[in-house]
Image (cartoon, helix red, strand yellow):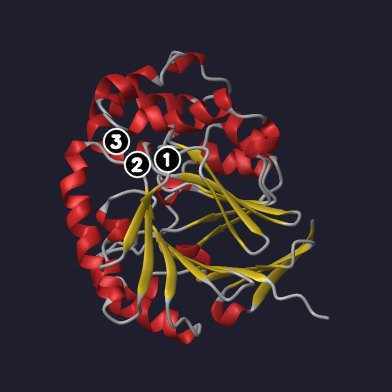
Amino acid sequence: MSIIPLKIYFLDMRPHQIRPGAHGDCSLIAFPTGETMLVDSSLPEYAGHITAWLRSLGVEKIDWFWASHYHIDHVGSIAQIAREIPVLHYLGPQFDRTFDEGYQQHIRAVGCTERRMRAGDTMDVGDVHIEVLFPFPDMQDECNDALIRSMYEKPLTAWPDMTPEALSFQKENFCTLRGEMGNIFSNVFRLTYGSFSMLFTGDMHMETEQFLLDHYSPEKLHATVTKIPHHYVQTSGMPAYIRTVRPRMSIALGDGRWAPWEKKALEEVGALDLVTGVDGEITLATDGHTLTAAWGKEKSVSRRFDL
């Protein structure tokens, strides 16, 4: 008897870009049970393209929409999509008062139930298991600059293996953390299916990577595939974190503006490193024992992994 695979699709916005560099995140998880989860929904201008894409994949309803965080390039299209394709449940992180009013208005516009996801929360869809790793419950009730700064228990210069470029970027941008709070407190969750695992990381920054290293075992952070946070820009990719995750493959949604230290760390662990804005739409299919990745024009390039 054939096993229905778990499939994960990563949409390439590049062919539809109206503004250079405007892309955002949008991924679809198609569970072996037939249920679906849309993870983020990119910018409002892509709603029509995403709806057509979902229909081309045979999606008649979205069982769960998971907003990694409440930024327009991650939630911008979902209200418009919901007018065409029913959305049953809305998942997302807890937000402080700064974000909550707008978030609640967004939930009402989509018109479905919602659940705030915190570290320790789990859900099972058939044999697929999902566990939320971040943020912790006590972090989310009052997110503020002091709390973010408390994540810097180690001075930047003490972070292992940090490159001068990464340190310089973080120091220059530390004063703007308030504006990056939504990114830093993105939901991070780990999906497992048999021997396959994947980390979904939203737009988390190095602060979050360090927190994960400090609070989880290497076994918990290891993943067959990891999503590169924040569109491969210079806010993540600590080499110590990459070596702990030890991915066989990494996927970034964006136009390929990668951080050189992150790219080098991925090369050192031997990860197949794909970027939608360079490699096109990417599809993963796994039965829990093997993984097949396909990308490029009409998915003409593929790689198979034994797990």
Image coordinates for residue 46, horizontal then vertical, percent: 29, 72
Image coordinates for residue 228, horizontal then vertical, percent: 50, 48
Is 272 drawn above or below residue 77 in the view shown?
above
Q: State the CA–CA distance, disc 3 to disc 1.
A: 9 Å
Name the residue rendered at 21%, 44% in the picture.
Answer: 100
Quadrant assignment for the C terminus: bottom right
Q: Earlier in the sequence, mark 2 or mark 1?
A: 2
Residue 169 showing in the rendered view = no
- Comparing 108 with 225, the one in front is 108
Q: Is residue 204 left or right of residue 282?
A: left
Please state which amino acid type lies under the numbered disc 2.
Asn
Asked if the residue at tag 1 contacts the one at tag 3, i.e. Cβ–Cβ closer than 8 Å, the answer is no
Q: Which mark is residue 268?
A: none
Image coordinates for residue 66, horizontal then vertical, percent: 41, 57
Q: Is residue 34 left or right of residue 27?
A: right
Please state which amino acid type lies under the numbered disc 1.
Met
Quarter where residue 52 is shown: bottom left
Q: Which mark is residue 183?
A: 2
Q: Residues within 10 Å of mark 3 (few under 14, many from 20)?
A: some
Image coordinates for residue 89, horizontal then vertical, percent: 38, 63
- Helix or strand or loop: what does disc 1 sit on? loop
Q: State the CA–CA distance, disc 3 to disc 2.
A: 5 Å
Q: Is residue 254 left or right of residue 147?
A: right
- Helix or strand or loop: what does disc 3 sit on? helix
Quadrant assignment for the N terminus: bottom right
Please state which amino acid type lies under the numbered disc 3.
Met
Asked if the residue at tag 2 contacts the one at tag 3, i.e. Cβ–Cβ closer than 8 Å, the answer is yes
Quarter where residue 83 is shown: bottom left
Q: Which mark is residue 181?
A: 3
Residue at the disc numbered 1 = 204
